Image (cartoon, rainbow, N blue to C red):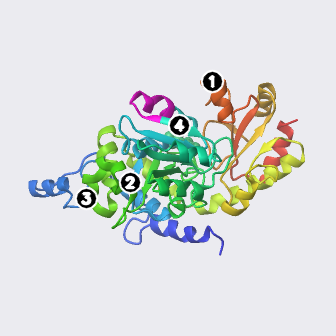
Amino acid sequence: MNHFEKYCTKFVQSVGSKDGAVSPTLTNSASFAYVTPEIAEGIFDGSVKKPLYSRMGNPTTSKLESILADMDGGVGAVATSSGMAATTLATMSIVSAGDEIISVGGLFGGTYALFSETLSRFGVKTTFFDVDELKNIQEAITENTKIIFLESVGNPNMRLPDIRAIANIAKESGVALIVDNTITPLIVSPLELGADIVVYSTTKIISGNSSALGGCVVFRAIEDGEDKFKTPRYKDLEKIIKKAGKIALIPIAKKRALRDFGMSANAHASYQTMLGLETLALRLPRIVNSVEFLAKELTKQGVKVNHPCLETHPHHQRYLTDFKYGCGTLLTIDMGTKEKAYHFLNATKIATITANIGDSRTLALHMASTIYSDFDDETKKFLGITEGLLRISIGLENPEDILEDFLNAAK
Ligand SMILES: *Cc1c(COP(=O)(O)O)cnc(C)c1O
């Protein structure tokens, strides 16, 4: 069976309902009435399972959360207002001033700025490593290290991590592993590979149509016996874990981040995200095939493409063994100079110039002059940003049409 088939059944069956309204019910209410003061008390102490206030949870958003938790085999999920909010929620609910984060691979510009600038203002220090620096990653772990953060595919450097090896380091040292799986939902199952928490920007391929900003964090269950979150490293989580048990990472996220920072998803975005999610398992394999076709054909025609399906890519073997279902919608093209990259963008008739990825349409962006324009030369070098670099996110168009258009634009 095609790897994506099981999700085709799961998504449409879980998004739609067989009782009453077939399309998910959109609960457009910020607050909820409690009927009696006794029920209000129960809702606040958790003994009555009814909505409290939409910052802490909304029925439409809960439906999205349960589908995404199920998709990744998690015990639960918390949806957020954006992908950056998901990363912020996942990290801020765990770290305090004086703690350290180890960031591996990638890195999405917003996440890099969050770690290097914003969290450092609050006394949280992040050290950045390439995916293959396993020894340095191991050696960098101290008693203050609370999180190893990893992107499933380097955006835009297209480097692929050995997720299992990094998860082993996290396991042996008892440090939480958070994987940003935005680019590879369904393709990579981080919890199965040993991650503790998965973050998504649902704005991208999960919604797939640029209609809703959103994010989601999926959590694994806390083990009954020993668990890394029960060790002295995570002492300040002890109380919630004792009280909540298996599902503790959910109240940890809600009480230590969502409640006070308020990065909550809005119901309308959750609704639209579910409409996109229904067809994710159809869109993704089609796009992955187009990406491979284009990477190979463009390379044959002399265009400088970066994608791990190419034999010349340093992680080609890892692509074949660990990324059997592809690595998402991205490839990059290095046009050599900014002028040539701009010429390409002005000449393409198919690509939409925008900062998004994972859309139904093919999208393109010049990296150095946009997302990375604020970054110094050394950081750009670390992140693989060259002057002529274009990030391309392939869409659902006929791949032959894209090829013809790109060959024309690259002239
Ligand atoms: C887009 C993106 C984010 C941030 O998501 P937003 O929804 O734009 O906040 C985080 N990580 C990756 C890998 C992304 O591509």
Q: Are marks 1 and 2 in contact (CB under 8 Å)?
A: no
Examine the rendering and report whether any part of residue 324 can be seen: no
Q: Position of residue 336 (x, y in %)?
A: 81, 31
Q: Residues within 10 Å of mark 3 (few under 14, many from 20)?
A: few
Q: Earlier in the sequence, mark 3 or mark 1?
A: 3
Q: Position of residue 11 (x, y in %)?
A: 51, 65
Q: Which residue is mark 3?
A: 242
State the CA–CA distance, disc 1 to disc 2. Answer: 39 Å
**Amino acid at dot 1:** Asp
Which SS type dominates the magenta stretch? helix
Q: Earlier in the sequence, mark 1 or mark 2?
A: 2
- Disc 3, SS: helix
Q: Which residue is mark 4?
A: 127
Q: Which mark is residue 376?
A: 1
State the CA–CA distance, disc 3 to disc 2. Answer: 27 Å
Q: Earlier in the sequence, mark 1 or mark 4?
A: 4
Q: Are marks 2 and 4 in contact (CB under 8 Å)?
A: no
Asked if 99 appears above or below 206 in the picture, the reply is: above
- Residue at 25%, 59% in the rendered image: 242
